[in-house]
Amino acid sequence: MIELRGVSKTYGGQTVLHPLDLSLAPRRTTVLIGPSGCGKSTLLRLIIGLVRPDAGSVAIDGHVVTPDSVLQVRRELGYVTQDGGLFPHLSARRNVELVAQFLGWERPRIDERVAVLAELTRFPPDALDRFPAQLSGGQKQRASLMRALMLDPRVILLDEPMGALDPMVRAELQTDLRAIFRSLEKTVILVTHDLAEAAWFGDEILLMRDGRIIQRGMLRQLIDEPAESFVTRFVSAQRRVVEPGGGGDS
């Protein structure tokens, strides 16, 4: 579904993503994890075409992303950022339906889609006409997810979408998101720094460091078969995942 060949990226003389090859299968959830600055968000932005690689190519379903094709490609990809990325001067409803309006969807089609997504994401219908400042953190992220799903994209990309939420709201949204991903059978790429969250969502985890993929596999493989000492240190630093009761068998 997604294939990167020899992709690299440098900012200001500093390499943030070393040349890498990566293939991701359809209808699976892949989690990119690693310490801050390891390149995971850059990799996500390269896939969606928000930044261009210095070298190499990105292909979605066999079609290489180019400057000429990037706008069309983005319509096949839903994108959710950490802060939700909602326009503050638009209501939740207007944020969700904005691109569909731009593409000329008829009002009945838009209204039907918004209603379906509100039910799917458990977004309260009476909050659709509120502005982002009037929404809770969880509601903002649900509205952002609705917007990402509006055009029924084949791929959903999420960049630490729950990083700013308090633990109870985060746990509730994690449960709902995993159920949504499984029911829709979308290709999902999620960025997080939280290993427990990675284990909860991921069919596969990609652990990154210094712009490189160090290891890919399930959590148990990272624990039992670390590719190098950094993997063990990273896993051990998140003790609640590997200590008794912490979900190390996920």
Image (tube, rainbow, N blue to C red):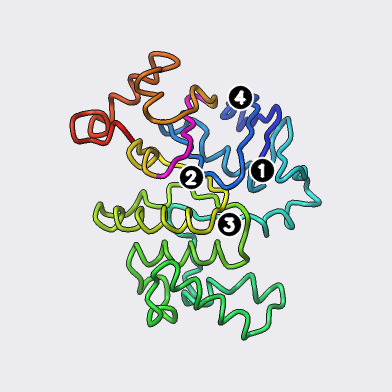
Marks 3/4: CA–CA distance: 26 Å
Marks 1/2: CA–CA distance: 15 Å
Q: What residue does disc 3 label?
A: 78
- Amino acid type, label 3: Gly
Q: In the rendered structure, does residue 4 fall within the stretch colored magenta?
A: no
Q: In the rendered structure, does residue 206 fall within the stretch colored magenta?
A: yes
Report the quarter where the N terminus lies: top right
Disc number for residue 1: 1
User: Which element type, helix, strand or loop, lies under badge 3?
Assistant: strand
- In depth, the one of 22 and 221 nearer the eye is 221
- Amino acid type, label 2: Leu
Give the residue displayed 36% in from the left and 53% down from the top: 174
The vertical placement of 7 against 82, above or below, is: above
Q: Position of residue 176 (x, y in %)?
A: 38, 59
Q: Earlier in the sequence, mark 4 or mark 1?
A: 1
Marks 2/3: CA–CA distance: 12 Å
Q: For mark 3, does the 10 Å Cα neighbourhood hold few (<14), some (14 to 19), or many (20 or more) residues?
A: many
Determine whether label 4 and label 1 are within 8 Å by CB: no
Q: Earlier in the sequence, mark 3 or mark 4?
A: 4
Q: What residue does disc 2 label?
A: 190
